[in-house]
């Protein structure tokens, strides 16, 4: 049940009185507001179901999705522990971190009627997972006492409840299918677990941390442990008992309980790989870096092999290519019965150390009593492996400093070295060869799909100047050469989501066009025919008349830029003249100017806004320049951020000139906005230019001294690049912001670096210098906004702010107007 209007007003009034929201105008109601029509109606429209193809390629599952949740769902209790956010009521993820599903249907790929699965009334569930044979689907149902495990059969009948409400989903799904599909490996809360510890009692002493001269730089993490009470709560809610749950509901424990951060059964079902955290816990890093034991047990819980005893890893160097020493990425080899694989740094984990080999990949087969076998040495950091068969696997490595990646083909039956397949700049979208297509085998393990002639089936996004056109290709493992065998048709966007036969000529695809929403089809590649499996309607027909066009333009230094220009339905430039326009952007860092200037059109996509999208402004008479390029390019060995403000200003000047020269934007009525790093950009542009009448900055960071060990793509610390941190921080130039700015921030922002204090302090600095600023705090919201009330109110704030400071603003004085806008 939703909270009463009186209760909501009271809560918000208290929040307003306690913080910067108290700047509310006299007489202004402190309640959530609705955005103007037709935005509210679009927000309340039912989302299209999400499709999922079964492993046996016979059934399509359709998941009904909940709409934006009411604020009272986010108001449920939440605990922030060791980097996690959980709901103590159900021992699952906090409501701000889960998108609930509300219905389930099955449909045969061969055709026929949709079969609705009978579920409990008012159900909401999450984490659906197919059985290896594709005949059943398991999922977690939220109940008052906790999370319970259900399973539904594709053959029909109501879903069956397999467990009581004791599934522990604090660290993830909480369950995995056994390889033979006979049951599931489930993390349960211990049967004898009592009440949560009482942490409201007075402390017995101070909280003390000490380094003893040990260097331990760490990045800016959120939601960490902070007291002995937090440690006790972490132990209580994160302790699990591994349990095998049969499809008949029988249960058998494996070993004893512990703080289990990860678990998986071997492909042959004989062993379980576990990662268990242990004390001492840390107050400066999340649980994934706590001391931990990684080991293998048999199915009775007896330890048969100790993989690693990892210490506290709070001293990992700050560069992005840095890793912790010791085994990491421990997993089962997908194509073998029970073979462990893992990676170990050979340079101490510090990329600043000179080394020919950075990482080595190892294997060890059951019964784990031999010496590990080296699969391959890598000159870059390991970034993943895709398993095929006994003779073929593909290992990826990357190096952030150069944005370089290498792909190697290895023969696991003859380990020790690999053959380079390709190397490339991984930011290069035009020349992306795609990735191997994987399919679940009979044990449910993802493995490479091979064509009949032994070539590897690949799929890619197919980015071109004209748009993304997904493709399927066949790559020769001997040469790395690829042949494209299918590509999405011109003017359409269609991607393969599954193959229906061994030849790969019958496929299931997801297809959309500029005027038709995405739906699922069965396509015959030989006959060039297709059959629709779904008929999802347009979720926002009110926006059907909106026009969009990719525009390209050049920055003063020669870097090519682009953005998608949206114009309201019915707009005619010659008849209506220039419009008020909003630029909504997000900067990105590059090492190659040519890659930074790549242009990809969206003219073949079906675009409709959702959530708190800025595209809703099209319904209010605004033009929108969406995602105008804001590349920050590092040249000649320099770091990109060494000239951040200079490049940002040049990109914005070029974008403004482009829309003004086209005659669609009034140079005196242009706003800029962005979320997160886009908010950081917005504040900087208002501080360093006079191009815009106002800005909207949502959930941003504005003072980089609060993220001193790196941020975004900046690897250097504050002490290594003090001037860069200072000059990039709009907080430093709060006295230069002479345009109105709207700040919005989620009260419970969980994103690294964008603590709400960033907006709070920036607001105080702007207020202290007499700026026109409004600061809106959204109660209970994280980095992205989820509640219907919060999303609606955000859009109301944006429309009202822009109407006041852009659409209906008086002309600027000559001194405040941009000097060169529109000049040839």
Image: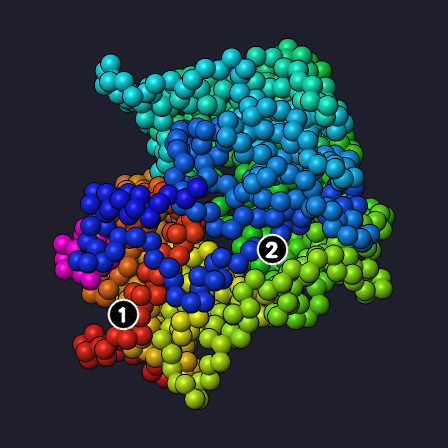
Per the image, label 1 sits on a secondary structure element best described as helix
Q: Is residue 730 visible?
A: no
Horizontal side of residue 408 vs 677, given as left or right: right
The structure residue drawn at horizontal position 24% and vertical position 46%, both measured from the top left corner, is 13
> Distance of mark 1 from mark 2, alpha carbons?
35 Å
Q: In front here: 321 or 508?
A: 508
Q: How many marks?
A: 2
Residue 236 rendering spot, x and y as whole percentages: 44, 19
Horizontal side of residue 179 vs 814, given as left or right: right
The structure residue drawn at horizontal position 58% and vertical position 59%, both measured from the top left corner, is 429
Numbered range of the magenta stretch: 761-775
Residue 792 rendering spot, x and y as whole percentages: 40, 57
The structure residue drawn at horizontal position 66% and vertical position 26%, both measured from the top left corner, is 162
Identify the disc placed on residue 48: 2
The structure residue drawn at horizontal position 65% and vertical position 32%, both measured from the top left corner, is 150
Display coloring: rainbow
- Give the residue number, with chain letter if any, for mark 1: 804
Residue 775 rendering spot, x and y as whole percentages: 26, 54
């Amino acid at each position: 049940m939703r909270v009463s209007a009186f209760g909501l007003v009271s809560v918000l009034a208290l929040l307003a009185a306690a913080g910067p929201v108290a700047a509310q105008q006299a007489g202004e109601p402190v309640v959530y507001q609705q955005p103007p029509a037709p935005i509210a109606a679009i927000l309340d429209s039912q989302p299209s179901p999400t499709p999922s193809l079964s492993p046996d390629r016979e059934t399509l599952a359709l998941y009904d999705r909940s709409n934006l949740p009411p604020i009272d769902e986010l108001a449920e209790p939440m605990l922030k522990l060791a980097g996690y956010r959980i709901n103590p009521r159900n021992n699952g993820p906090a409501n701000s971190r889960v998108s609930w599903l509300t219905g389930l249907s099955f449909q045969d790929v061969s055709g026929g009627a949709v079969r609705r699965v009978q579920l409990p009334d008012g159900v909401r569930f999450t984490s659906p997972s197919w059985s290896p044979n594709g005949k059943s689907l398991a999922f977690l149902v939220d109940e008052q006492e906790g999370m319970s495990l259900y399973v539904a059969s594709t053959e029909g009948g109501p879903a069956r409840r397999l467990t009581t409400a004791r599934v522990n989903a604090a660290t993830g799904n909480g369950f995995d299918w056994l390889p033979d599909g006979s049951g599931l490996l489930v993390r349960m809360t211990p049967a004898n677990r009592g009440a949560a510890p009482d942490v409201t009692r007075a402390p017995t002493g101070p909280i003390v941390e000490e380094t003893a001269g040990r260097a331990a730089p760490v990045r800016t993490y959120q939601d960490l442990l902070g007291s002995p009470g937090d440690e006790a709560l972490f132990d209580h809610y994160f302790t699990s008992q591994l349990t095998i749950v049969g499809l008949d509901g029988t249960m058998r424990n494996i070993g004893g309980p512990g703080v289990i951060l990860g678990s998986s059964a071997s492909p042959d079902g004989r062993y379980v790989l576990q990662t268990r955290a242990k004390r001492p816990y840390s107050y400066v890093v999340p649980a994934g870096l706590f001391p931990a034991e990684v080991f293998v047990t048999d199915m009775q819980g007896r330890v048969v092999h100790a993989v690693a005893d990892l210490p506290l890893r709070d001293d990992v160097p700050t560069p992005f290519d840095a890793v912790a020493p010791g085994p990491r990425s421990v997993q089962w080899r997908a194509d073998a019965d029970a073979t462990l694989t893992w990676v170990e740094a050979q340079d101490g984990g510090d990329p600043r150390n000179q080394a020919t080999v950075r990482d080595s990949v190892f294997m060890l087969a059951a019964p784990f009593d031999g010496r590990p076998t080296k699969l391959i040495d890598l000159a870059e950091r390991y970034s993943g492996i895709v398993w095929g068969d006994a003779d073929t696997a593909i290992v990826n490595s990357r190096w952030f400093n150069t944005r370089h990646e290498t792909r190697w083909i290895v023969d696991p039956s003859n380990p020790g070295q690999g053959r380079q397949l390709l190397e490339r700049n991984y930011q290069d979208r035009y020349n992306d060869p795609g990735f191997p297509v994987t399919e679940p085998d009979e044990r449910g393990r993802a493995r490479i799909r091979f064509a009949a002639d032994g070539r590897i089936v690949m799929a890619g996004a197919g980015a071109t100047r004209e748009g993304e056109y997904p493709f399927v290709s066949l790559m020769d493992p001997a040469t790395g050469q690829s042949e494209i065998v299918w590509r999405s048709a011109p003017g359409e966007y269609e991607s393969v989501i599954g193959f229906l036969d061994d030849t790969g000529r019958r496929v299931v695809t997801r297809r959309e066009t500029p005027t038709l929403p995405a739906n699922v089809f069965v396509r015959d590649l030989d006959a060039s025919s297709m059959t629709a499996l779904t008929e999802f309607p347009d979720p926002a027909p009110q926006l059907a008349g909106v026009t969009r066009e990719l525009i390209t333009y050049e920055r003063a230094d020669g870097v090519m830029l682009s953005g998608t220009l949206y114009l309201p339905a019915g707009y005619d430039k010659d008849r209506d003249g220039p419009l008020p326009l909003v630029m909504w952007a997000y900067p990105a860092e590059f090492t190659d100017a040519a890659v930074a200037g790549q242009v990809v059109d969206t003219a073949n996509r079906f675009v409709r806004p959702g959530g708190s999208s800025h595209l809703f402004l099209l319904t209010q008479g605004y033009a929108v320049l969406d995602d105008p390029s804001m590349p920050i390019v590092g040249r000649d060995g320099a770091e990109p951020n060494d000239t951040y403000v200079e490049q940002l200003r040049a990109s914005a000047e070029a974008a403004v000139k482009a829309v003004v020269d086209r005659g669609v934007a009034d140079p005196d009525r242009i706003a800029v906005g962005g979320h997160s790093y886009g908010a950081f950009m917005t504040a900087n542009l208002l501080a360093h230019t006079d191009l815009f009448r106002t800005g909207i900055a949502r959930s941003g960071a504005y003072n980089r001294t609060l993220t001193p060990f790196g941020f975004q793509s900046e690897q250097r610390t504050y002490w290594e690049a003090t001037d860069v941190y200072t000059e990039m921080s709009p907080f430093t130039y709060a006295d230069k912001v002479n345009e109105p700015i709207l700040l919005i921030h989620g009260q419970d922002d969980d994103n690294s670096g964008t603590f709400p204090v960033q907006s709070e302090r920036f607001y105080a600095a702007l207020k202290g210098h007499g700026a026109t600023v409004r600061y809106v705090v959204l109660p209970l919201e994280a980095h992205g906004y989820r509640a219907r009330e919060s999303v609606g109110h955000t859009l109301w704030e944006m429309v009202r702010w822009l109407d006041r400071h852009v659409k209906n603003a008086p002309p600027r004085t000559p001194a405040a107007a941009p000097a060169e806008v529109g000049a040839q």
